[in-house]
DNA sequence: GCGGTCACGAAATCAACGTTACAGAAGTTT
DNA sequence: AAACTTCTGTAACGTTGATTTCGTGACCGC
């Protein structure tokens, strides 16, 4: 079974590189270290991954896949705002359990392309909330706010745990930071539940909902400039 | 003037290293590159900074000093919540104009000790708001939330500008993200202005204010365990 | 059973890195 | 003026990095 052995070795290199990357706290990991730790020769690594870049790209994809899998598996709870909550919690949880991968992903200005799918999933959740009339700001703005705040909170938690490892007791404080910031952003971005808000918030929410629906299904009876202008007006109503 | 020449060369090396660090987008900068770019020999660098670590520590302090100077120069506007706003804006502004230094500071789990003073200044601003009765959550919690969200927003803006450089037009969208997130967190953390809120929020704010005052000036008439228990109760009141 | 492809290891190659002897120049002190 | 300290350049040293060259054993279709 050549294919079996092949996958075994490749996977072993991948796992070893991931472990070394997690242990080395930020400073670079050499291909030599990966080879010796995995018990393979250098040509084996180059046979499977081409070069160092290819190896670490594969490692990044490998480490991020568990997160994407959990995100993709997320089913709607019926309440789109609760779905946003669960998405936030999944994000923070992944960062806390995989700090090395996470800082590689979101701590650098050059966000790897693998993270693009995570962002697409977030846009999907936010879009659903918008179509349900639960947003009071444009969907793109809401997504950016949620993403930025979530990344900031996760990096702060990682920094805390790096500073004082082994402290299990502050898990409560960590959850407090995450949940409070999450609710702060969601409160600023969503409308409570039903149309019980004042007229201003509901008209804003309806403008956002219409905007999201039009984005998903472009109006055929309007020209492109007309649609663009309409979108701008709807944003202005949403900004209230 | 030996001292003059000394400072000149040292400063030139510092500036050159800072520039190379800003240009090299994340990947490491070699001492050789710094030496050739600064027009000095290697022993000069080692004479002034000891080794590579010493050089980059000095560079980090050098790059962060402008930020700390602006923070320290910040005078109160009279409204402690407005002071928090200005502190946030200063933070974001520094990150956008110095993305390389900023990601070095806040993008890594190992936050350099120089950033500790920035955090102390933030704690001072938050403490002032707490003593003025403008906080509805404990001061430490508020500081953590503001810091985490601010870092997240700044990193998001840096990532945006790295993705599409030269785009001056989206400065408005950038400010929108920063201001909206800032107001979202401040709204969740502070109370509006005067004691016009309902009884629950004012009692919470007063509990936080008392807590902050006691932290600054420990009560002499209470034993340490008593004071600890009192603090816990005040936090519970503040949490509502 | 045999040529060919695939997976892998031992050792080597080449460049780049941090760092250091050594030496010379310039100012300061005596 | 001589000795000394400080600052700096030339030229290396030793290490480590990524990557390749060559060779060998195993498996697979014919």
Image: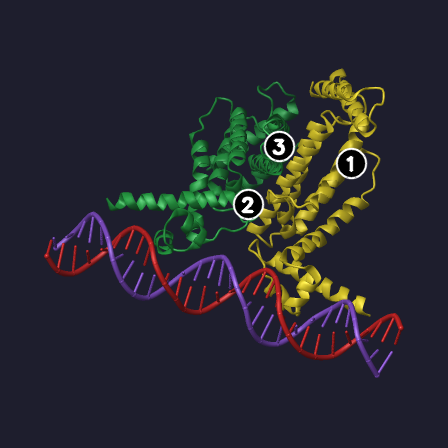
Chain colours: A yellow, B green, C purple, D red
Point out the tag, 3 or 2, that comes first from the N-terminus: 2
Nearer the observer, disc 3 or disc 1?
Answer: 1
**Secondary element at image label 1:** helix
Mark 3 touching mark 2, by CB under 8 A? Answer: no
Is residue B123 shown left or right of residue B36? right
Q: Which of A158 and B107 lies nearest the eye of the viewer? A: B107
Q: Residue at x 36, y 43 (%)?
A: B11
Identity of the residue drawn at 28% across and 43% down: B4
Residue A11 point in image, percent of width and height = 73, 62
Label 3, residues with CA under 10 Å away: few <14, some 14-19, many ≥20 = many
Residue A201 visible to an observer of this rendering = no
Q: Marks 3 and 1, Cα distance to the nearest angstrom?
A: 36 Å
Image marks 3 and 1: residues in contact by CB distance under 8 Å? no
Given residues A7 and B121, the one toward you in this image is: A7
Chain under label 3? B
Q: Horizontal placement of C26 versus B116: left or right?
A: left
Q: Nearer the viewer, residue B170 or A153?
A: B170
Q: Which residue is mark 1?
A: A124
**Image side of residue A68 versus residue A166, left or right:** right
Mark linked to residue B25: 2
Q: Please give the label number shown on residue B238.
A: 3
Q: Chain of mark 1?
A: A
> Residue B122's x, y, as percent?
51, 35
Name the secondary structure under disc 3: helix
Name the quadrant containing residue A35: bottom right
- Report the Cα–Cα distance between label 2 and label 1: 31 Å
């Amino acid at each position: 079974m050549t294919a079996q052995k092949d996958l075994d070795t490749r996977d072993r290199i991948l796992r070893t590189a991931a472990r070394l990357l997690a242990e080395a706290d930020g400073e670079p990991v050499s291909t030599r270290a990966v080879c010796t730790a995995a018990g393979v020769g250098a040509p084996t690594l180059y046979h499977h991954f081409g070069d160092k870049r290819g190896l670490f790209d594969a490692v990044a994809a490998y480490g991020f896949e568990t997160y994407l899998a959990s995100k993709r598996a997320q089913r709607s709870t019926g309440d789109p705002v609760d779905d946003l909550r669960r998405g936030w919690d999944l994000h923070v949880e992944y960062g806390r359990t995989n700090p090395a991968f996470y800082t590689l992903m979101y701590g650098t200005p050059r966000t790897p392309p693998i993270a693009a799918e995570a962002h697409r999933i977030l846009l999907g959740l936010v879009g659903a909330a918008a179509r349900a009339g639960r947003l009071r700001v444009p969907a793109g703005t809401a997504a950016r706010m949620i993403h930025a705040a979530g990344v900031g909170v996760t990096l702060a938690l990682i920094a805390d745990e790096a500073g004082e490892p082994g402290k299990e007791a502050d898990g409560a404080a960590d959850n407090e930071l995450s949940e409070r910031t999450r609710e702060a952003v969601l409160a600023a971005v969503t409308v409570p539940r039903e149309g019980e808000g004042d007229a201003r918030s509901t008209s804003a929410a309806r403008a956002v909902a219409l905007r999201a629906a039009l984005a998903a299904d472009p109006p055929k009876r309007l020209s492109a400039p007309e649609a663009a202008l309409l979108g701008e007006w709807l944003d202005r109503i949403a900004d209230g």
